[in-house]
Image (tube, rainbow, N blue to C red):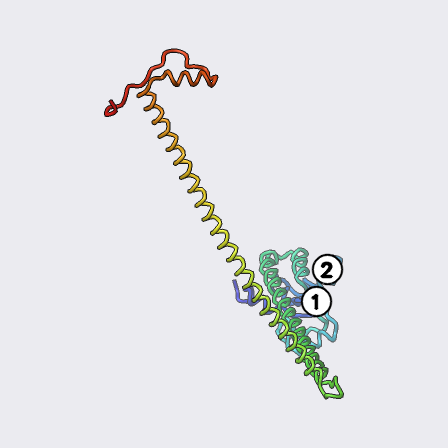
Amino acid sequence: MSEELSSEGIRSKIITLRARAVMLDADLAFLYGTETKKLNQQVKRNIERFPDMFAFQLTRDEFAGLKSQSVTASSKHGGRRTPPWAFTEHGVAMAATVLTSPRAVQVLHLIIEVFVDTRQQMLSGAAAKETGKYRKRLASIHQKLEKFSEAILDVEINKRDHTTVRQEAEALTTSVLDAVKAHLADKQVRNEEVIAEIHRKMAEADKLRAEARKVHAEADALDIKNLRDRFELMTSIVATLAESDPQPLLTAMDELGLPAPVGRIEILPPRKGTE
């Protein structure tokens, strides 16, 4: 691939006209391997395929401006008297369809890629330019607002005391801050009081739980003592019955109207050591 058919070579042939990236007819004809006259003839024969957004012929003023910028100084442009045609990205693609040059089809994709890249660079540059304008406008507005604010703050609001808006605003700000600090300090004291009350209640609850545990322990001890006394009483009764005649017990039960035991009454033998 020759240097002129490289991306950089094609990019050097793209110029900006009417805020659009375009390529002049002579440069496009060279890349497509045909003559400028033949390219323009095919465009005129198929003019319905080339609306203004595809191709347009430069005005004499535009052509003069290009000459003054040495854009048409090469041999491909030199000596021509009629303004050239300029082809946009879409026009470049359409021109390849009306030409019979095989080379046009071969280099079309490369030219389109360069056009797309050039358009993106133009958009980025335009966006950056617009952003710079907005930043300057915002900076100017900010400076004006700052001067206006300073002028307002320096206006005398109290003729008697000769105080300005700035001084009154500072006094008001100080007063509000003092009130906020006092409120926060009072709130802190109240919070500490609430926390102390909570701790006191928790201590009372612990004391009540301890007393409840003590009462339960005493009740359990009392139940055990009662059971022990009952057991000793039963043991004593059994021992008494074993050592005495059961007849008096049966007589007493009969007098009290209690039913007498049915069946044989056996008295447990006396324990050793009681005989």
Residues packed near mark 1 inside 10 Å, few (<14), some (14 to 19) or many (20 plus): many
Q: Can you give x and y, in whole percent of width and height, for residue 75 in the image?
A: 62, 73
**In the image, what residue type sits under mark 1?**
Trp
Describe residue 269's horizontal placement relative to residue 64 as left or right. left
Q: Is residue 67 visible?
A: no
The quadrant in which residue 229 appears is: top left
Which residue does the numbered mark 1 point to in the structure image? 85
Mark before the other along the chain sequence, 2 or 1: 2
Which residue does the numbered mark 2 point to in the structure image? 50
The quadrant in which residue 176 appears is: bottom right
Disc tally is 2
Q: Are marks 2 and 1 in contact (CB under 8 Å)?
A: no
Name the residue rendered at 67%, 71% in the picture: 130
Q: Can you give x and y, in whole percent of width and height, for residue 139 in the image?
A: 66, 77
Label 1: state its secondary structure.
strand
Residues packed near mark 2 inside 10 Å, few (<14), some (14 to 19) or many (20 plus): some
Residue 232 vertical position relative to residue 253 in the rendered view, above or below? below
Name the residue rendered at 36%, 17% in the picture: 246
Quadrant where the C terminus sits is top left
Residue 175 vertical position relative to residue 14 in the rendered view, above or below? below
**In the image, what residue type sits under mark 2?**
Phe
Q: Can you give x and y, in whole percent of width and height, for residue 201 in the image?
A: 52, 55
Using the image as rendered, state which of residue 8 and residue 229 is in the foreground: 229
Using the image as rendered, state which of residue 236 and residue 141 is in the foreground: 236
Gap between marks 2 and 1 measured at Cα: 11 Å
Residue 168 vertical position relative to residue 182 in the rendered view, above or below? below
Residue 87 vertical position relative to residue 249 in the rendered view, above or below? below
Using the image as rendered, state which of residue 76 and residue 220 is in the foreground: 220
Label 2: state its secondary structure.
loop
